[in-house]
Image (cartoon, rainbow, N blue to C red):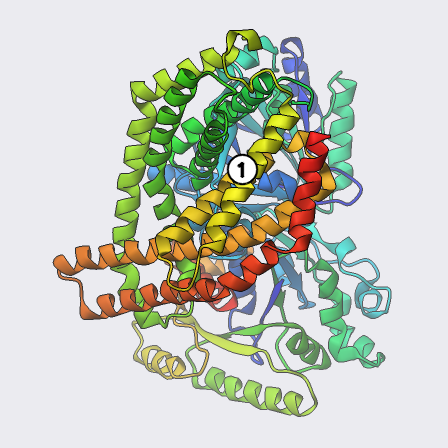
């Protein structure tokens, strides 16, 4: 039985590492305390969270337990018991045929709702797995009710969770466990609500045996001891640049930070377990391309040309999969107003979109595993790691101060955006707005990549306005892309004999996208007028002025 | 937190069986469940291997400073906690009667636990009392076991009359979700009454079979799943909970 409960004045769970020479003593102490031992069972425990640690942030821990004897395990051989603890209240427990990836893998009910609200589009990923032999010791009252549980784990080995383990070297989880001399035996004491005193007595006895207690479940304690960062992984750029450094060094530092994001998300994007890996990889690639675009005269031409070509290919490789991810992620919201009959008529459409998405992800997987990708990233990594001085580069901006070079690039990007936006009128084709969106993104990426050297207040003020304008262009473009994609899907499934109801429902869905597109288009002039006003220009001038000062 | 009451005007229809096993079925789907045994007989308390007794008794709970949290105990069913019964609950009406806002007292006691539990299941004594009115005011739905007998069906009508009367007094009526309890499909009368129940507004479609394994709950002192995980009655409570969950969320 896996059960936790809350006592305001006592932790629910404590974990006590046991040294090899204390194992026997601990077991006999538990027996002397009147606890009754169950069978020793091979068990695995896996800690799950989203890659950006949304559960940890909410104070929750999701642990999947897999052991002989669990009802789900008996039936399928692969079943798990998912225990979600932490926060207010006791643990929630659910038996599942397999470890969950999405909240929708859980049965309908409050736990699924809670996780769905927290995780949104994020998947549950394994952070660490413990394998070992567990023996449950129970303290019972005269009526036979459990009043405390102690799980005695031996032969504990750390495995798995490679998506979340530190990616800074090639060490496996087991290597990390060995190197850090993680405990191979643990006693996990679980208090039962209303019986805090009993758990306190057991903990006190374990302390007498020379054990220390850590107020976390064993799997969380081991994650911490293994040095796994449970605060998750984001795509925040960690760039160390200063205004006075040569532009060559500053640009290379930005490229290095972006490459680290590509590396960190590559395995996850290939596994396609969470769309955010692909999204973050794609953003890092686009940022790289944007900075490369402006790096003429900063880095050698032959390097820039090769990198632009390579990252251009990576960008193209990921485009379709991302568009289809967005289509699927937005599906519920876009079809929310449809009646049940129309929803049901749309099911074949969603199935077809899901097939296209899977095929696109297969292409991404193949492309990311392609030797050409390794070759590109290895070459780029090597070039960025090779010491290089400005006198080895013939670009005239390479040796200039970073701040001044960036100021010029920001001005060019902003000038281009304003020029293209002012040329847009009611008759401009959608392509022009798409190009404008790219201009806006390129400018935004420059602001993000060189944020450490930009003055904070005007930068934030400017980016807020740019973002608002960019959102309009983004929504317009998404609506345009998705309407076309659905039109293509309609042709495909019509050829396969889709029902009239389904085709009519697609028509309604395309109409939803079209209404969004038209709405964005009608707001364009007003939104651009806000962007093109004095406040924006003043903020921009303040940023550039300080860079030039 | 959603609150349900296993309730019937009539006794011996399977209220406690429903409360205990629905709580267990809910917890199995990941809900954090609190069972409150309001029946002084304490059958649910006994089934969860606990002894009756609430420090301060019914009087302590009803007074302004009373709270449920100190009386909550974990049960052996993962995810299910219990506020045990107390013999003094037989005087609950008297204590409630002395309070000005007696109808809301049960809801007020549950409210502080709303963040800790997803579901509260109240196991109620039969009959119509002041405490019944408090339960009606506190819950989202009354889950009413109906045994296949004419008398039991009549109690459903009586319940609706009571709710109408309370509505007149300003108590918003909860949903009424009856289900067939202790059904033996081999008997023609049971089949007829099942069909009649199906036409009742809010009726749940799952019928819980009459089975000796259910009667063993008092011996095993555990929800059905603990000793008969594959029995049809256990599956029936899982299905019944799935129906309830679909209505609640």
Quadrant (top left, top right, bottom left, bottom right) of the N terminus of chain A: top right
**Residue A99 picture location, percent across and down:** 43, 38
Q: Nearer the viewer, residue B207 or B125?
A: B207
Crowding at dot 1, Cα within 10 Å, few <14 / some 14-19 / many 20+, comes out as some
Q: Nearer the viewer, residue A480 or B8?
A: A480
**Residue A292 picture location, percent across and down:** 47, 27
Q: From the image, tell me which residue sits under label 1.
A: A412
Q: Nearer the viewer, residue A537 or A82?
A: A537
Looking at the image, residue A346 lies above or below residue A292:
below
**Residue A143 picture location, percent across and down:** 65, 46
Looking at the image, residue A422 lies above or below residue A256:
below
**Residue A257 picture location, percent across and down:** 55, 24
Question: Is residue B9 in sight in this rendering?
Answer: yes
Please count the marks in the image.
1
Question: Label 1 marks which chain's residue?
Answer: A
In which quadrant of the rendered view does residue B191 lie? bottom left
Q: As drawn, is A452 to the left or to the right of A251? A: right
Q: What residue is at 81 percent from the left and 64 percent from the top?
A: B57
Q: What residue is at 35 percent from the left and 57 percent from the top?
A: A429
Q: As drawn, is A40 to the left or to the right of A269? A: right
Quadrant (top left, top right, bottom left, bottom right) of the C terminus of chain A: top right
Find numbered disc 1 in the image and state the secondary structure of the residue it sits on. Answer: helix
Question: Is residue A234 in sight in this rendering?
Answer: no
In which quadrant of the rendered view does residue B213 lie? bottom left
């Amino acid at each position: 039985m896996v059960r936790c409960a809350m006592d305001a004045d006592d932790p629910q769970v404590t974990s006590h590492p046991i040294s090899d020479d204390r194992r026997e003593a601990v077991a006999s102490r538990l027996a002397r305390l009147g606890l009754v031992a169950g069978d020793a069972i091979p068990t695995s425990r896996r800690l799950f969270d989203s890659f950006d640690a949304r559960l940890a942030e909410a104070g929750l821990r999701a642990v999947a337990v897999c052991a002989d004897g669990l009802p789900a395990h008996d039936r399928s051989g692969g079943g798990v018991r998912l225990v979600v603890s932490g926060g207010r209240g006791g643990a929630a427990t659910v038996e599942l045929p397999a470890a969950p990836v999405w909240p929708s893998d859980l049965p309908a009910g409050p736990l699924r709702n809670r996780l769905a609200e927290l995780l949104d589009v994020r998947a549950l990923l394994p952070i660490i797995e413990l394998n070992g032999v567990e023996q449950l010791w129970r303290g019972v009252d005269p009526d036979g009710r459990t009043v405390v549980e102690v799980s005695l784990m031996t032969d504990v080995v750390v495995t798995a969770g490679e998506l979340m383990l530190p990616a800074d070297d090639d060490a496996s989880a087991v290597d990390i466990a060995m190197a850090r001399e993680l405990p191979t035996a643990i006693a996990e004491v679980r208090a039962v609500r209303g019986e805090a005193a009993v758990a306190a007595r057991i903990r006190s006895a374990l302390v007498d045996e020379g054990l220390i207690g850590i107020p976390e479940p064993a799997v969380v304690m081991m994650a911490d001891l293994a040095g796994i960062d449970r605060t998750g992984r984001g795509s925040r750029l960690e760039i160390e640049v200063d205004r006075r450094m040569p532009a060559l060094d500053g640009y290379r530092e930005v490229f290095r930070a972006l490459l680290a994001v590509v590396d960190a998300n590559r395995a996850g994007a290939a596994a396609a377990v969470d769309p955010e890996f692909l999204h973050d990889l794609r953003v890092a690639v686009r940022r790289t391309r944007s900075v490369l675009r402006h790096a003429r005269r900063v880095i050698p031409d032959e390097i820039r040309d090769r990198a632009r070509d390579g990252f251009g290919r990576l960008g193209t490789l990921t485009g379709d999969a991302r568009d289809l991810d967005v289509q699927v992620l937005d599906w519920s919201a876009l079809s929310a107003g449809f009646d049940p009959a129309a929803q049901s008529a749309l099911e074949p459409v969603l199935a077809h979109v899901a097939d296209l998405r899977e095929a696109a992800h297969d292409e991404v997987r193949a492309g990311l595993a392609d030797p050409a990708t390794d070759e590109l990233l290895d070459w780029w990594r090597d070039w960025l790691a090779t010491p290089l001085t400005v006198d080895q580069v013939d670009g005239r901006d390479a040796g200039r101060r970073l701040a001044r070079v960036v100021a010029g690039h920001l001005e060019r990007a902003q000038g281009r955006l304003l020029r293209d936006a002012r040329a847009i009128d009611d008759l401009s084709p959608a392509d022009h707005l798409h190009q404008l969106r790219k201009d806006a993104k390129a400018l935004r990426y420059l602001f993000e990549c060189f944020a450490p050297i930009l003055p904070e207040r005007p930068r934030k003020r400017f980016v807020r306005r740019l973002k608002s304008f960019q959102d309009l262009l983004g929504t317009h473009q998404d609506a345009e892309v998705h309407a076309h994609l659905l039109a293509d899907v309609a042709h495909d499934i019509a050829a396969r004999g889709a029902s009239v109801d389904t085709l009519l429902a697609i028509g309604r869905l395309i109409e939803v996208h079209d209404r969004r597109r038209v709405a964005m288009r009608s707001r364009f002039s007003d939104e651009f007028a806000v962007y093109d006003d004095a406040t924006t220009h003043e903020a921009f001038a303040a940023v550039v002025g300080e860079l030039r000062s | 937190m959603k609150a349900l009451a296993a309730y019937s005007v009539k006794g011996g229809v399977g209220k406690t069986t429903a409360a205990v096993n629905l709580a267990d079925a809910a917890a199995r789907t990941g809900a954090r469940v609190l069972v409150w045994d309001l029946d002084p007989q304490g059958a649910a308390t006994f089934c969860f291997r606990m002894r009756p007794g609430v420090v301060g008794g019914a009087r302590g709970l009803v007074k302004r400073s009373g709270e449920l949290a100190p009386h909550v105990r974990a049960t052996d069913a993962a995810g299910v906690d219990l506020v045990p019964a107390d013999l003094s609950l037989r005087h609950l009406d008297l204590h409630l009667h002395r309070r000005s806002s007696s109808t809301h007292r049960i809801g007020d006691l549950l409210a502080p636990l709303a963040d800790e539990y997803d579901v509260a299941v109240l196991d109620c004594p039969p009959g119509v009392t002041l405490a019944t009115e408090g339960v009606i005011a506190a819950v989202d739905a009354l889950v009413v076991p109906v045994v296949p007998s004419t008398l039991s069906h009549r109690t459903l009508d009586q319940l609706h009359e009571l709710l109408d009367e309370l509505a007149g007094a300003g108590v918003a009526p909860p949903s009424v979700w009856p289900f067939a309890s202790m059904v033996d499909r081999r008997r023609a009368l049971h089949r007829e009454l099942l069909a009649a129940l199906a036409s009742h507004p809010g009726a749940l479609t799952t019928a819980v079979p009459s089975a000796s394994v259910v009667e063993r709950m008092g011996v095993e002192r555990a929800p059905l799943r603990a000793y008969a995980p594959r029995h049809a009655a256990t599956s029936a409570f899982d299905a019944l909970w799935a129906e309830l969950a679909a209505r609640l969320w």
